[in-house]
Image (tube, rainbow, N blue to C red):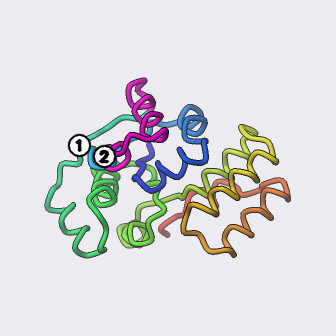
Amino acid sequence: MMILDASTLILLAKIEILETFVLNYPEKVLMPEKVREEACLKKTEEAALIEKLIRSNRIHVVRAKNTKLINRLMEDFHINGGEAEAVTLALQEKASMVATDDKNAIRACKILKIDFTTAIAILIRTFEKNLLDQDETLIKMQKLGSIARYSRTIIEDAIKRIEGGGSYGEKDFKHSHK
């Protein structure tokens, strides 16, 4: 089971791989209520797609119950409510990983020993599973590089992996806390 936070959810929607990813992910995909609020607040194409995936039960909205932990995470890691709820929900539901591109949420995952992944890793993994061809993947990677806060080095490394045929592997897709 994977928990999506708003940053990754929106990035995947903007580069037009969210639906492909969710439809082909072998486990349940969840998001906390707060992430739904954040991602669907504005009436955008991305918000419409996210709502469609929720209505079709491809993404499940679940309430994160431990408000003390949510508040503590927000305070300790300087993350917003959506990221705090995503991390809390991962612990609550014993999820296999959190998809986040938020630096402080990643730090929280590492400290709490929760595996995580990012939009860039999901894009490469989608290519490796032959759900996108190389040219399409490179275009989406360039777009991701222009809208996300990745360093030029990270984008260049990802492009080299794609041009080299992928070989990202499960261990690179899932950033282990170990």
The reply to whether the magenta stretch includes residue 112 is no
Judge from the rendering whether residue 64 lies leftward or rightward of residue 67; answer left or right. Answer: right
Residue situated furthest left in the rendering? 68
Q: Secondary structure at mark 2?
A: strand
Judge from the rendering whether residue 35 lies leftward or rightward of residue 147; answer left or right. Answer: left
Q: Residue at x 41, y 48 (%)?
A: 3
- For the stretch drawn in magenta, the main secondary structure is helix
Q: Quadrant location of residue 85?
A: bottom left
Q: Amino acid at mark 2?
A: Pro
Q: Is residue 108 above or below residue 98?
A: below
The magenta region covers 36-58
Q: Residue at x 55, y 47 (%)?
A: 14
First of labels 1, 2 by sequence position: 2
Q: Residue at x 66, y 56 (%)?
A: 143
Q: Which of 113/76 is in front? A: 76
Q: Is residue 64 above or below residue 152?
A: above
Q: Is residue 42 above or below residue 168?
A: above
Judge from the rendering whether residue 73 lies leftward or rightward of residue 66; answer left or right. Answer: right
Q: Residue at x 48, y 54 (%)?
A: 8
Residue situated furthest front in the rendering? 43
Disc assigned to residue 32: 2
Disc assigned to residue 63: 1
The x and y percentages for residue 21 are 58, 39
